[in-house]
């Protein structure tokens, strides 16, 4: 290391070790007192970090110093105070609304990188590399696995990234491209909504078709760009009042649902209802009770299909406690029987 480099580093005093395994520490500039992150990365990423330092992309930590040392690169970069998504996921799941906002912000961060003269592919998009600050502003960190896209190459020569989030092409089958990051976004979205990887379970909500497209094995079958992905994500926020079974326009689902709704109507308006003495109800009381039965059957349908996030609005939703979630489901189902029954009883007492 040159004397100049040693002099530059002498201005940064280590405050705490962030990740000893990866040699990442929190440092403080002795004069300005500002906090920075110091890390040692492979020198093959020098070009990427030089671009990041020169261009200053939004929502990416600013690079303060780059110091070459043998085959390693010492990076001093802006410290982002906040929680990464992995830490948040350890406590709870993300709602569809939160997921939509975060993913659209991420697409906005990636767009200028992908649109750069020599496109920059992050190649390691995962919860721990995304930080939300105190104002819920999203930052993308850790470009250690990043590379420039080279149209002349047919496959990656350096295999980098995190196994569960890496696209197939990162294993050397093809070259990483902008669509490599899109694959990782699909894994990320599924993790945020379910707490699990797509190989374990996949979300059945509004993001289902988007995640499926992101996770296509063939990059050509994925979204063409993060702009196209962001546009698709934005559409999930458009309210749909179509009943469960009719939202995805699947002929099979619509047929099954139509039969179910007809059965609810037939059962509710042909059933004979008796009072507590065993006497058959007639007239207004009979029709009122039939409406009550139809109401709770329809409410159950909306509840268990999570229509317009109906079930999500119930309290005590917690990923880490299956018993609490089961109790929550049972209580919710009971309330949807009890509430129509109480309303029917009140109306009967008035008339």
Image: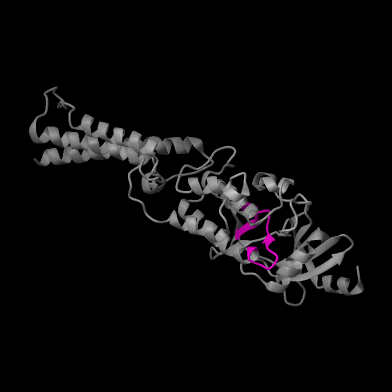
Colouring of the image: one colour
Locate residue 255, reporting x and y percent: 34, 35
Left or right of residue 151: residue 84: left
Report which quarter residue 32 is drawn in.
bottom right
127 relative position to 22: left or right: left
Determine the residue located farthest toward the top in the rendered image: 278
Q: Residue 122's image quarter?
A: bottom right
The part of the chain drawn in magenta is: 114-131
Q: Is residue 99 above or below residue 64?
A: above
Residue 349, quarter of picture: top left
Q: Is residue 261 above or below residue 182?
A: above
Q: Which residue lies furthest to the front in this view?
A: 152
Please check the rendered image and state whether residue 82 is part of the magenta-colored stretch, yes or no.
Answer: no
Q: Position of residue 33 (x, y in %)?
A: 72, 74
Which quarter of the figure is the N terminus placed in? bottom right
For the point 88% across and 75% down, the residue is 4
Residue 92 visible to an observer of this rendering:
no
At 69% from the left and 72% from the top, the residue drawn is: 55
Residue 250, how many percent across, how many down? 40, 40
Give the camera-side residue of 219 and 305.
Answer: 219
- Left or right of residue 339, residue 223 in this image: right
Closer-to-camera residue (6/33):
6
Number of marks in the rendered image = 0
- Residue 156 is situated, as x and y percent measured from the top left of the image, at 75, 51
Res 183 visible: yes
* Screen quadrant of the C terminus: top left
Using residue 35 as the reference point, say whether residue 82 is left or right of it. left
């Amino acid at each position: 290391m040159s004397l100049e480099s040693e002099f530059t580093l002498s201005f940064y005093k280590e405050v705490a070790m962030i990740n000893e395994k990866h040699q990442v520490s929190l440092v403080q500039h002795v004069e300005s007192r500002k906090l920075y992150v110091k890390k040692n990365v492979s020198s093959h990423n020098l070009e990427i970090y030089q671009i990041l330092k020169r261009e200053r992309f939004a929502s990416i930590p600013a690079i303060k110093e780059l110091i070459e040392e043998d085959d390693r690169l010492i990076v001093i970069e802006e410290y982002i105070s906040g929680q990464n998504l992995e830490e948040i996921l350890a406590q709870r799941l993300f709602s569809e609304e939160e997921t939509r906002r975060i993913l659209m912000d991420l697409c906005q961060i990636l767009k200028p990188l992908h649109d750069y003269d020599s496109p920059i592919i992050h190649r390691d998009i995962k919860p721990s590399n995304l930080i939300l600050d105190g104002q819920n502003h999203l930052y993308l960190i850790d470009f250690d696995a990043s590379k420039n896209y080279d149209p002349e190459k047919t496959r990656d020569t350096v295999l980098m990234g995190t196994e569960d989030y890496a696209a197939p092409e990162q294993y050397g089958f093809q070259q990483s491209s902008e669509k490599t990051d899109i694959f990782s976004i699909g894994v990320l979205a599924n993790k945020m909504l379910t707490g699990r990887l797509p190989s374990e379970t996949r979300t059945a909500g509004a993001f289902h078709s988007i995640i499926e497209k992101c996770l296509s094995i063939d990059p050509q079958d994925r979204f063409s760009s993060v702009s196209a992905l962001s546009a698709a994500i934005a559409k999930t926020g458009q309210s749909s009042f179509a009943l469960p079974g009719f939202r995805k326009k699947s002929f099979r689902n619509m047929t099954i649902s139509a039969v179910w709704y007809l059965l609810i109507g037939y059962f509710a308006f042909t059933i004979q209802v008796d009072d507590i003495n065993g006497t058959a109800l007639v007239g207004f009381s009979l029709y009122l009770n039939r409406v009550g039965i139809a109401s709770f059957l329809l409410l159950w349908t909306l509840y268990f299909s999570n229509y317009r996030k109906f079930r999500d609005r119930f309290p005590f939703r917690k990923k880490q406690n299956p018993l609490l979630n089961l109790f929550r489901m049972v209580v919710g189902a009971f309330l949807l029987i009890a509430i129509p029954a109480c309303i029917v009883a009140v109306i009967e007492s008035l008339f």
